[in-house]
Image (cartoon, grey):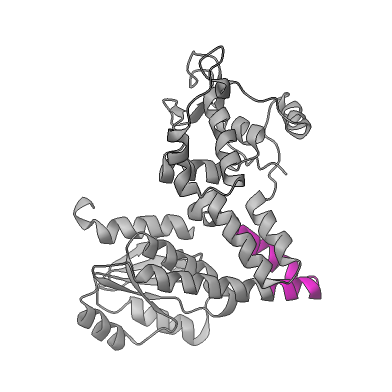
């Protein structure tokens, strides 16, 4: 299934005058790749370098699309995405009428052609499930964590870590969570996926922290069970960027947090609030912590904005709700403080 999320179409004034340039949604329909992966290939690995309109829209040439097809071939052959660039550099372009046959766009398959025909009247195709999320869901349905781990590893190799986790991983989680409310078998699948995902992210976090240096930042993820996933993903994304986080599963008293930050000389703390609705003792404990004097506190998660206006001497900063975006901002603030 093709992944074609809504995106604004460039206006006539926004497009260059040259022909043969295509917006990202055209490229995704033509190649079957999803936009998150395509942007990760550009940003993280430099495999594709599209042109940009004055408003920042990406535009791809026929040569870019042919290069994407070749990248997909290499990934299917088992080449790791981190090594694809070296392989492409070693390859000698074949001769052809324009110097390279790979600059000619391969004919689209029937499914892609149908997708283009559906859009010719204007507008945007309806949102469908990200194919990476669909792959995870399909494997989860078998209730086999070994096959799920293998499928996950193949997705990481093909799409890169950011390509899998920027959106698709949590989309699979949310889809399973919703289905679990209506069917006992889906509830079992959700439990299997959650147990595997928490273990996998925790193992990756431990490994990533071995390579981190610099000041330690205490990070409180007070949720339990499946509610920990987005918080773990935030910590792992930060650790992959070199941020030395100290995961804490329980909210501690203001005095304990003060002693901890002083002992570690921590520049800040992070509190992940997974839900918009907290009540009882957890709500009161979090409010006391955030309203007590101390190092700045970064608030993350869907419920973060509900605490951003608390009065108190501690500086409160709200991170974006998406874990990878939050990790990017957090890492920039703490690892490069001079620039902010």
Whether the magenta-drawn stretch holds residue 274 is answered as: no
Tell me what residue is drawn at x 43 percent, y 34 percent. 89
Magenta range is: 167-190
- Residue 296 in sight: yes
Residue placed most toward the observer, 45 or 9: 45
User: Where 67 falls versus 254 (above or below)?
Assistant: above
For the residue pair 318 and 114, the one nearer the viewer reads as 114
Find residue 213 and report its image quarter: bottom left
Left or right: residue 68 compared with residue 289: right
Residue located 42% across and 39% down the image: 46
Q: Is residue 327 above or below residue 18?
A: below
Which is the main secondary structure of the residues drawn in magenta? helix
- Residue at position x 65%, y 56% from top? 133
Count of marks, rendered view: 0
Residue 21 in view of the camera: no
Task: Give the quadrant of residue 106.
Answer: top right
Q: Position of residue 285 (x, y in %)?
A: 41, 84
Q: Quadrant of the N terminus?
A: top right
């Amino acid at each position: 299934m093709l992944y074609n999320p809504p995106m604004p179409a460039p206006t006539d004034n926004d497009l260059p005058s040259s022909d043969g340039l295509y917006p990202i949604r055209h490229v995704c329909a033509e190649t079957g790749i999803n936009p998150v992966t395509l942007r990760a290939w550009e940003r993280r690995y430099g495999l594709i370098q599209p042109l940009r309109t004055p408003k920042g829209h990406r535009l791809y040439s026929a040569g870019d699309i042919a290069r994407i097809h070749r990248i997909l071939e290499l990934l299917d052959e088992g080449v790791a995405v981190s090594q694809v660039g070296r392989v492409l550099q070693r390859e000698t372009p074949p001769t052809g009428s324009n110097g390279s046959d790979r600059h000619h766009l391969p004919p689209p398959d029937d499914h892609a052609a149908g997708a283009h025909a559906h859009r010719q009247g204007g507008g945007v195709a309806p949102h469908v499930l990200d194919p990476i999320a669909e792959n995870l869901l399909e494997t989860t349905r078998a209730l086999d964590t070994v096959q799920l781990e293998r499928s996950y590893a193949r997705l990481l190799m093909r799409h890169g870590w950011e390509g899998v986790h920027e959106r698709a991983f949590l989309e699979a989680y949310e889809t399973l969570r919703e289905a679990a409310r209506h069917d006992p078998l889906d509830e079992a699948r959700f439990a299997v996926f959650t147990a595997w995902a928490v273990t996998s992210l925790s193992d990756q976090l431990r490994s990533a922290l071995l390579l981190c240096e610099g000041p330690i930042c205490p990070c409180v993820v007070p949720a339990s069970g499946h509610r920990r996933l987005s918080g773990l993903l935030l910590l792992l994304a930060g650790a992959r960027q070199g941020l030395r986080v100290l995961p804490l599963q329980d909210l501690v008293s203001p005095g304990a947090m003060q002693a901890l930050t002083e002992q570690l000389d921590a520049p800040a703390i992070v509190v992940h609030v997974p839900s918009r609705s907290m009540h009882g003792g957890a709500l009161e404990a979090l409010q006391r912590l955030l309203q007590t004097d101390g190092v700045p506190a970064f608030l993350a998660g869907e419920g973060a904005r509900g605490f951003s206006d608390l009065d108190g001497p501690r500086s409160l900063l709200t991170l974006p709700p998406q874990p990878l975006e939050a990790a990017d901002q957090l890492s920039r603030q703490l690892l490069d403080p001079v620039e902010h």
